[in-house]
Amino acid sequence: MARRATSTMKQASISEFFEKNKHFLGYDTLQRSVITAVKEAIDNSLDACEEHRILPTISIELRKIPDKKDRILMISQDNGPGIPAKSIEKVFGSLLFGSRFHTIRQTRGQQGIGITGVVMYSQLTTGKTTHVVSKIKKDATALRMDIGLDTKKNAAIVSNRERTHDFLDHNGLPVEHGLRIEAPMKAKFQRGKKSVGQYLRMTAIVNPHATIRFHAYDDEDELIDSFVSERVTDRLPRAVREIKPHPHGIEIGALNRLLRDSTEKRMSSFLRHTFSGIPMRAMKEILSSSDLEPQTVPGNVTPEEAQKILTAFSQVRLMAPPTDCLSPIEDLLIKKGLEKGVDSAFVSTLTREPNVANGNPFQVEVGLIYGSGDVPADGPIEVLRFANRVPLMYQQGGCLLTKAIEAVSWKGYGLDQPGGKGVPKGAATILVHLASTNVQFTSEAKEAVADNEIVMNEIRKALQEIGRHLKNHKKKSAQKAKTKEKFELVNEILPAIATKASSLLSRDEPDLAPIITKIMNAVFCEDEVTWDKESKVHRCEIKIHNYSARPRAFSILAQYPEKEGVEFIENELGGKREVKGIWCWKLDTIPPGEAGTIQFSLKGLDHNEWNSTEVFFRGSGDIIGASKIDEEILAEIQKEEERILEDAKEQASLIAEDAMTSDLDNSGDLDSTELSNAMSGVLGDALSEKDPENIIKKHDQDDSGTLDHDEIKKAVMDSGESRQTGLNEWGDE
């Protein structure tokens, strides 16, 4: 009986498995299937364009096939680099084939399933092949072919392969480079929520560098839906660098495989060259804890010894991995994308500093739009979820990004939240973007992010900050509206009465300023940010009007975009930096009926990068149009900045110590050759400059032609990588 049972067992191929379980890939309903297909095409196009530093222009067409119920032809075309002839069959005809699965860097696609899944679904539901046209720049002609999938062999079936000159863009011009896909499939087209149009709208928000065109036609070739989003920036996302795996993200099976497959001859070089975040000190401690000699051959390490190494990884103090493998959207471009996609009265965006979870670098970005005409005030807010610039449209309730929104007490920030929990209500849209080298999804369809406490806390902190921005905005707007109305009444009625009375009594009109001041009895703030086209600077003016009966004195604080390359000019009152993005000035005493003015300018920003400020104050009473600074929050931010700085200093020192192990002549400093050797380790990750001679020239303070420990430490700090590479001690975490 056992033999009979085992004789019927067969191994299924990857393709066969997904053919029978297509819902795993997002092809579970006819409406969702077309969105999934478009998503895979868009993801591939954007990734390919960005990797080759091409500003993406992508066209999506959906055409209902005549005389066929629920049959749609999806056409995707881009201006990417194209796919070389020898790779086309693998890309479109082999599941789990791709360039990103084995790399540690931020990409949209990770699994090598997506576009082959489109070919498989097309074949499964229509019996038809997928038509592919590819043109690379160096070829005179484009290559086109029809591709099917042999699910048993997980391989492409190619037919009608030929070269052609007939590959044109949307203007009818010959394509220099690009890719076109035509895939028939069983699917249903719909408009509104959870539609292709909505998906592309969301994609355009977080990809402001892309031009996306969408047109849908019925079976009589009549246009039934369209969406065109032109790029709002010519700045491509930051190119990401592949990094080595970090010990904190390694499991025993993966470690055993790395040991077995390693070409390194010694364990010392294996640890240093295979992983990120292991300086010389840590390498020695790991080997000592594992009872291994530095010269041990990695392939000879036993499973028991491998387990000791894994244990040592968690006990030894390591540096976090570099974060130049991430490419955040950044505040300004999120704001541009949101303003393009959603009509609103108020927009606030925030990009958090990179962090690390389970050895994987990640970064959180959030945006909040208030006063959106697209969202009813009495219904739930609109939630826009993204992972690595890809919209997540399904499984909202089971997604970590949604749970983080629900974990914030929004009532305190001016949004209705019945019961004090759940998604808030109001005319608002909240955007959450998670950028990571390894986004943990709840399923292969990649529609919801799995739970992670560290990521959850980062998102919650970011949402609380933009919540405070909303609260201040609402308070400021309400106060200004009320005060403006009062001012208008007082300034219109009183002068009219004074003029009339003076005329009747044949007397001079009285000075109304003291009377108006007494009636108003308030301190009022006006602020304005303007762009000087000639000098290319932003000018900010803050006026504090004292319409009260006594002299007033305040410390005024204002937000500004603090980042590399931005500096204060024309700042007569001086002041001081409180925390990142907050500057403080002390105003002289303002007499009743007079105003105090703060003026300053910033250079180093683009035209649309700063158009408003948030004003805070210290002092007794209240200022209409400004918010009293929350000293507890300010102190918390200051402590966090101090901790980051101290961690950065400590880490820079540790990196310098590690670099000095390359001092072979024990001279106490490194020449260009020794520095080059040192940069093969953690020093190379910590410095933005990669030329040893230039590094020495720039940071050699004593003109010795070499760098000592302190000079290397300063070079690491000056590079700015101490923050960008997440150089915090993991032992403290």
Image (cartoon, rainbow, N blue to C red):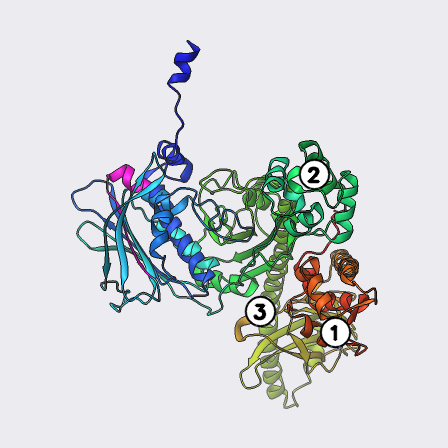
Q: Earlier in the sequence, mark 3 or mark 1?
A: 3
Q: Amino acid at mark 2?
A: Leu
Name the front one of labels 2 and 3: 2
- Number of residues whose C-alpha sits closer than 10 Å to that of mark 2, classed few (under 14), some (14–19) or many (20 or more): some
Kindly indicate the quadrant of the structure image that contains residue 553.
bottom right
Q: CA distance from mark 3 to mark 1?
A: 60 Å
Name the residue carrying label 2: 310
Q: CA distance from mark 1 to mark 2?
A: 38 Å
Q: Is residue 143 left or right of residue 456?
A: left
Which of 458/240 is in front? 240
In the rendered image, is residue 732 in sight?
Answer: no
Residue 699 tag number = 1
Mark 3 secondary-structure assignment = helix
Asked if 569 appears above or below 251 in the picture, the reply is below
Which of 318/74 is in front? 318
Kindly indicate the quadrant of the structure image that contains residue 22.
top left
Q: Is residue 53 left or right of residue 635?
A: left
Q: CA distance from mark 2 to mark 3?
A: 68 Å
- Number of residues whose C-alpha sits closer than 10 Å to that of mark 1, classed few (under 14), some (14–19) or many (20 or more): many
- Number of residues whose C-alpha sits closer than 10 Å to that of mark 3, classed few (under 14), some (14–19) or many (20 or more): few
Q: Earlier in the sequence, mark 2 or mark 3?
A: 2
Name the front one of labels 3 and 1: 1
Which range of residues does the magenta coloring cover? 120-135
